[in-house]
Image (cartoon, rainbow, N blue to C red):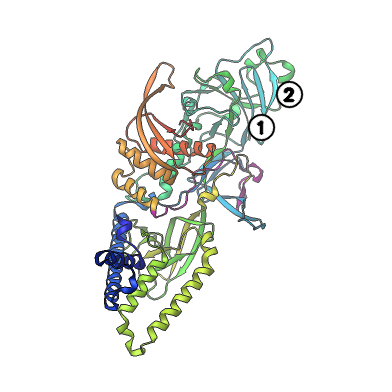
């Protein structure tokens, strides 16, 4: 119905002429009276103007309502994330969220373009994290003793004699630590199966493990990856900051494989030894003599559900923490008369993420108002506006320009003083210039991710210079950087450069949503408030999260084995997703999307339910 109501001017005129032919029985349009043709032309012009006015009204209504009722965080660009390993130069170091690392990624050129290009993809932690001058050099489990090099490669150095085994489901970690380390409080431990595929429940079982050093129990936490004190107060706009939401989602995704030691009263130097006494009854003495230097041995006993064959493939790394693809920019803006707008000019591959701080030369900090800036608000406030990115309009540029030309012709009386031919000549030149601009900018528009963003603010008195600090991201460009890739420190000498490498592939990056997917995001935001309760909330969440990659979502009830040894089956909520034809995603990419969506869905659900995401088009991926 919408396509019938809205048409171009030529289509409207042709339909009116056809109906007139059928009504009067005229076979040739040339037989119409010139006066009738003139009336039909005038009627077509008015109908075309009315259809454009309706579209303008629709556009303004959707734009205004969405900006007021739904947070902009739902449609913002999302940075890619991964887990990074780093080792400090000193005994301990705290890396804050402004510490940056980068990776030079090769860009694939277009067809026929043989030139190679690279882009620096920047990463940084979401919050401060503590790292130690220490490393896991040995690991023992079952009847195997492994040596681990600086690149986390495992080498079997000893096997049990006479089929002797270590304690069932026990893993011993041998840590080489600096003598200057007096406490292991805040040490992050990362678990991964790099070459062995395990399900999510196996990672969840790690939270039931028992940790100890020389039979002294260790407290571990899954909620202390970042070295931040307890927050005293929360801003009323905390949920409207995209970085806060990214922190929540990234933390939820890695929570079941990242653990933090809490050992304030344990002195590491007092527990150093070459190897635990139990090793003498399991491994040959000739192999144990090859161990170099005293080590700090941590014993981890995991649930019996994790078999010994799975433990043999386990990889454990310390000094690991999540990072996201974001780059910090500093901008100085001098205030001029009637100038309270700061344009943010970005490079071709960058997309705006959020504002970190805005302050003036007097040291006054400005507060962001996410709902939009208004002139009558108090000084010291600012808002972010996205130039041109909020367009909800199905008309293309040519049709909008046609409407502009019609308006100019209707108002040609205003140009009568310049002569009768002035308007026609000016319109013809304008049309030629616009066509030339379209031809010149076609290639450039393909590389531009989004239009300019603006900071609109109301300065305080005596403010002459504004200092802006903001973050950008590379969105999808930051995805698919493989495990083991080396990063370089950016303007930092506190971290050993050869210790920076990825422990997981980067994933989760997404560009700012287009008009079609923004409607889905606003529908999800308006109906759920970013909290999942009902089945319809799950459906809206999936359409927002997967966008055009899926065509249908169905909710069913199911059963699965519980991860607790003393439980049987548990009820599940099965979310059946139908992939869109020609989506172009590989099975491993679908697996990554399903894992991310599952963690986000679980963190947003207020019900204690077990969710499973399944693909229904021949792909049996289950999360």
* Neighbours of disc 1 within 10 Å: few (<14), some (14-19), many (20+): few
The region drawn magenta spans: 487-515
Residue 153 marker: 1
Distance in Å between CA atoms under marks 1 and 2 = 18 Å
* Neighbours of disc 2 within 10 Å: few (<14), some (14-19), many (20+): few
Q: Residue furthest left?
A: 23
The answer to whether mark 1 and mark 2 are in CB contact below 8 A is no
Find residue 50 and report its horizontal and vertical position in percent: 27, 67
Which of the two residues, 174 or 371, is positioned nearer the viewer here?
Answer: 371
Q: Which residue is mark 2?
A: 290
Magenta run includes residue 575: no
Relative horizontal placement of residue 221, taking residue 85 as reference (left or right) = left
Relative horizontal placement of residue 138, taking residue 76 as reference (left or right) = right
Find residue 116 and report its horizontal and vertical position in percent: 66, 56
Find residue 392 and report its horizontal and vertical position in percent: 36, 58
Residue 401 in which image quadrant: bottom left
Question: Image point 31% across, 58% down: which residue?
Answer: 4
> Please, is residue 484 above or below residue 199 in the view?
below
* Residue 499, visible in the rendered structure: yes
> Please, is residue 543 above or below residue 466 in the view?
above
Asked which secondary structure carries label 1, the reply is loop
Asked which secondary structure carries label 2, the reply is loop
């Amino acid at each position: 119905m919408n396509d019938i109501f809205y048409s171009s001017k030529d289509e409207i005129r042709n339909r009116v002429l056809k109906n007139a032919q059928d009504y009067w029985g005229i076979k040739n349009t040339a037989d119409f009276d010139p006066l009738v043709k003139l009336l039909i032309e005038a009627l077509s012009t008015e109908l075309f103007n009315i259809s454009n006015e309706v579209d303008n009204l629709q556009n303004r209504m959707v734009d205004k309502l969405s900006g007021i009722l739904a947070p902009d965080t739902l449609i913002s660009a999302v940075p890619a994330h991964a887990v990074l390993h780093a080792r400090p130069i000193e005994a301990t170091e705290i890396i804050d969220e402004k510490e940056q690392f980068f990776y030079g990624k090769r860009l694939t050129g277009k067809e026929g373009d043989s030139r190679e290009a690279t882009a620096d993809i920047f990463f940084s932690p979401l919050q401060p994290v503590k790292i130690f001058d220490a490393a896991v050099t040995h690991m023992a489990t079952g009847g195997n003793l492994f040596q681990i090099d600086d690149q986390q490669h495992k080498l079997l150095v000893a096997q049990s004699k006479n089929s002797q085994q270590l304690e069932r489901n026990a893993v011993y970690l041998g840590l080489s630590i600096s003598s200057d380390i007096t406490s292991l409080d805040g040490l992050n431990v990362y678990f991964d199966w790099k070459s062995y595929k395990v399900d999510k429940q196996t990672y969840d079982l790690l939270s039931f493990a028992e940790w100890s050093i020389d039979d002294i129990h260790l407290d571990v936490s899954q909620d202390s990856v970042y070295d931040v004190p307890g927050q005293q107060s929360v801003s009323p706009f905390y949920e409207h900051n995209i970085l806060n939401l990214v922190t929540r989602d990234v933390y939820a995704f890695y929570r079941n494989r990242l653990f933090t030691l809490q050992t304030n009263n344990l002195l590491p130097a007092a527990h150093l030894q070459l190897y635990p006494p139990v090793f003498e009854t399991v491994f040959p003495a000739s192999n144990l003599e090859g161990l170099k230097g005293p080590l700090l041995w941590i014993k981890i006993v995991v649930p019996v559900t994790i078999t010994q064959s799975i433990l043999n493939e386990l990889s454990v790394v310390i000094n690991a923490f999540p990072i996201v693809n974001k780059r910090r920019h500093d901008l100085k803006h001098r205030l001029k008369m009637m100038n309270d707008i700061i344009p943010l000019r970005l490079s071709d591959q960058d997309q705006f993420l959020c504002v970190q701080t805005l302050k003036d030369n007097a040291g006054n900090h400005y507060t962001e108002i996410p709902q939009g800036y208004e002139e009558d608000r108090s000084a010291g406030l600012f808002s972010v506006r996205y130039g041109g990115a909020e367009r909800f309009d199905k008309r293309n540029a040519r049709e909008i320009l046609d409407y502009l030309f019609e308006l100019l012709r209707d108002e040609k009386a205003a140009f009568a003083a310049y002569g009768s031919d002035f308007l026609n000549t000016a319109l013809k030149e304008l049309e030629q210039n616009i066509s030339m601009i379209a031809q010149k900018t076609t290639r450039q528009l393909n590389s531009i991710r989004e239009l300019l963003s603006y900071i609109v603010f109301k300065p305080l008195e005596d403010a002459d210079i504004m200092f802006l600090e903001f973050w950008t991201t590379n969105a999808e460009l930051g995805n698919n950087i493989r495990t083991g890739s080396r990063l370089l420190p950016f303007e930092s000498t506190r971290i050993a450069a050869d210790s920076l490498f990825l422990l997981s592939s980067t994933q989760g990056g997404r560009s700012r949503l287009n008009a079609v997917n923004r409607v889905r995001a606003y529908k999800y935001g308006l109906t759920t408030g970013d909290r999942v309760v009902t089945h319809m909330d799950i459906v809206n969440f999936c359409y927002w999260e997967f966008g055009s990659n899926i065509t249908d979502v169905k909710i069913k009830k199911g059963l699965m084995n519980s991860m607790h040894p003393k439980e049987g089956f548990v009820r599940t909520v099965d979310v059946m997703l139908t992939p869109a034809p020609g989506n172009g995603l590989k099975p491993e990419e679908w697996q990554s999307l399903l894992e991310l969506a599952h963690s986000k869905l679980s963190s947003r659900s207020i019900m204690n339910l077990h969710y499973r995401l399944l693909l229904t088009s021949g792909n049996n991926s289950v999360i």
